[in-house]
Image (tube, helix red, strand yellow):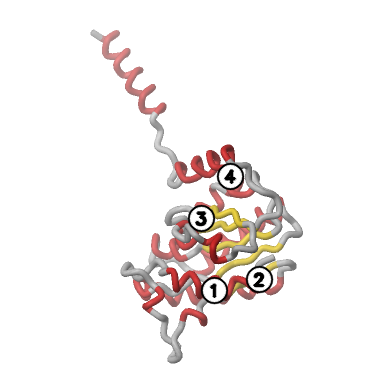
């Protein structure tokens, strides 16, 4: 009986370890690898890295017909996820420019998070980029003020300010501020630029972003 029990326990632990839980967004990264195998990524493209604002912008190439883009936005990713998967997001590519949009999900994940924590997460990712691409253009799009996350705006504003100051001191780096372009004449966030979830953008919202982004794109 003991031998049977021991064999059962051994089988249980073997199955448990073989089915070890994969990290969040692991499947997204595997899909990127599959895409790269099926269609080798072009050199000297503009690499977009970040969260769902890029992920859901599936027709982004139509907004920039004269640019070669690689869109590697995934799910509700946070700065921590960009750092965790940095090798997978950077090593396969030889871009001439990287544009990042990420950060608001960090606060959505933890409403008590301080701005300096997200800023430091960004700086960590930025350092990883520079270790591999010391001279290319690297730009950061400001965190948008989604109406559904209004309670988090103070932290987001502080984060934008700190990252803007950091990027200003860095060579070949720009802070792309989309916040003003998303306001009406009274300085209020335009809710019509958002889908009903008040988080993701409509095509018109994407066009507003595209208009601001174009002058920065190589």
The numbered mark, 1 or 3, whose residue comes first in the sequence reads 3
Q: Are discs 3 and 4 less than 8 Å apart at CB?
A: no
Q: Badge 3: few (under 14), some or many (20 or more) residues near its Cα, within 10 Å?
A: many
Q: Position of residue 112 (x, y in %)?
A: 40, 67
Q: Are discs 2 and 1 less than 8 Å apart at CB?
A: no
Q: Badge 4: few (under 14), some or many (20 or more) residues near its Cα, within 10 Å?
A: some
The numbered mark, 2 or 4, whose residue comes first in the sequence reads 4
Residue occupying the point 32% across, 22% down: 12
For marks 3 and 4, give the CA distance: 12 Å
Residue identifier under label 3: 73
Residue identifier under label 2: 216
The numbered mark, 1 or 4, whose residue comes first in the sequence reads 4
In the rendered view, tell whether residue 177 sits above or below residue 101.
Answer: below
Residue identifier under label 4: 88
Residue identifier under label 1: 160
The numbered mark, 2 or 3, whose residue comes first in the sequence reads 3
Say which of marks 1 and 3 sits in front. 3
Q: Badge 2: few (under 14), some or many (20 or more) residues near its Cα, within 10 Å?
A: some
Q: Most extreme residue toward the left, as rendered?
A: 1
Say which of marks 3 and 4 sits in front. 3
Q: Position of residue 19 (x, y in %)?
A: 38, 30
84 to the left or right of 165: left
Q: What secondary structure is found at the residue carrying circle 3?
A: strand
Q: What secondary structure is found at the residue carrying circle 1?
A: helix
């Amino acid at each position: 009986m003991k031998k049977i029990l021991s064999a059962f326990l051994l089988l249980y632990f073997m199955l448990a370890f073989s089915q070890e839980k994969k990290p969040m967004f692991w499947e997204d990264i595997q899909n990127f690898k599959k895409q790269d195998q099926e269609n080798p990524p072009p050199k000297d493209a503009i690499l977009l890295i970040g969260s769902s604002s890029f992920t859901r912008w599936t027709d982004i190439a139509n907004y920039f017909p004269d640019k070669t883009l690689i869109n590697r936005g995934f799910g509700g990713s946070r700065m921590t996820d960009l750092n965790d998967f940095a090798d997978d997001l950077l090593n396969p590519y030889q871009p001439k420019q990287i544009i990042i949009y990420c950060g608001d999900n960090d606060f959505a994940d933890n409403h008590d998070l301080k701005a300096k924590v997200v800023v430091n997460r960004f700086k960590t990712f930025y350092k990883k980029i520079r270790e591999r691409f010391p001279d290319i253009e690297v730009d950061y799009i400001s965190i948008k003020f989604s109406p559904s996350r209004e309670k988090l705006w103070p932290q987001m504003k502080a984060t934008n300010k700190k990252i803007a100051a950091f990027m200003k001191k860095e060579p070949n780096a720009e802070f792309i501020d989309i916040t003003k372009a998303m306001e009406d004449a009274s300085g209020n966030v335009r809710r019509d630029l958002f889908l009903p979830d008040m988080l993701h953008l409509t095509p018109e919202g994407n066009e507003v972003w595209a208009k601001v982004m174009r002058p920065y794109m190589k």
